[in-house]
């Protein structure tokens, strides 16, 4: 969504257009846009003639920023609470919490190397190559 907004700038995009591009529900798109708005990345204007646009330069928005907004504080590995009567289950959370923390850090470090602007450039270059074929 952010990449599409960066590509379409300065024109705002409606959630229906973003949903069609992503093959997703407009309701889902609006939920995610709400998170981006709350984080200060996007502004949205509802109704006819409305739409959403980026508030920040896409060269300053990394995939790590996007992932943190979408993922929140959820564990990378998902929920791992076990049954308290099981010797493995009652200890699994404490065993996996450090691994989860390290996995999250590694993922964020990798995602921080790519910006929305870079994705737009790569998408355009790929589209241009396919047009030549």
Image: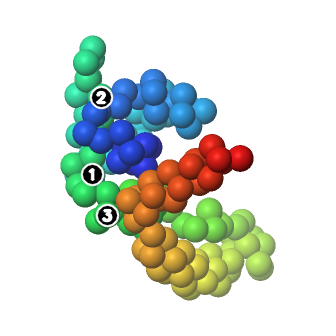
Give how far apart the Cα atoms at labels 1 and 3 are. Answer: 12 Å
For label 1, the SS is loop
- Marks 3 and 1: in contact by CB < 8 Å? no
Query: Which tag, 2 or 1, sits closer to the chain's start?
Result: 1
| Side (left or right) of 121 relative to 92 | left
Which residue does the numbered mark 1 point to in the structure image? 41
Residues 53 and 83: in front is 53
Is disc 1 surrounded by few (<14), some (14 to 19) or many (20+) residues within 10 Å?
Answer: many
> Which residue is drawn at the image coordinates 45% and 58% (left, top)?
121
Give how far apart the Cα atoms at labels 2 and 1 are. Answer: 14 Å
Q: Name, please, the residue furthest toward the top.
A: 48
- Marks 3 and 2: in contact by CB < 8 Å? no
Which residue does the numbered mark 3 point to in the structure image? 59
- Marks 1 and 2: in contact by CB < 8 Å? no
State whether residue 102 is above or below residue 69.
below
Which residue does the numbered mark 2 point to in the structure image? 51
Residue 104: % across, % down: 52, 75
Q: Is residue 35 visible?
A: no
Residue 83: % across, % down: 72, 66
Q: Nearer the viewer, mark 1 or mark 3?
A: 3
């Amino acid at each position: 969504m952010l990449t599409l907004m960066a590509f379409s700038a300065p024109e705002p995009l409606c959630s229906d257009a973003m949903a069609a591009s992503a093959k997703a529900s407009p309701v889902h798109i609006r939920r995610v846009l709400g998170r981006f708005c709350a984080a200060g990345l996007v502004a949205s204007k509802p109704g006819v003639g409305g739409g959403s646009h980026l508030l920040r330069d896409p060269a300053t928005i990394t995939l790590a920023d996007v992932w943190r907004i979408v993922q929140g504080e959820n564990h990378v590995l998902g929920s791992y609470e076990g049954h308290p009567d099981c010797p493995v289950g009652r200890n699994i959370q404490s065993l996996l919490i450090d691994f989860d923390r390290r996995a999250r850090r590694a993922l964020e470090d990798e995602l921080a190397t790519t910006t929305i602007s870079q994705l737009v450039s790569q998408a355009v270059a790929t589209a241009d190559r396919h047009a030549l074929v």
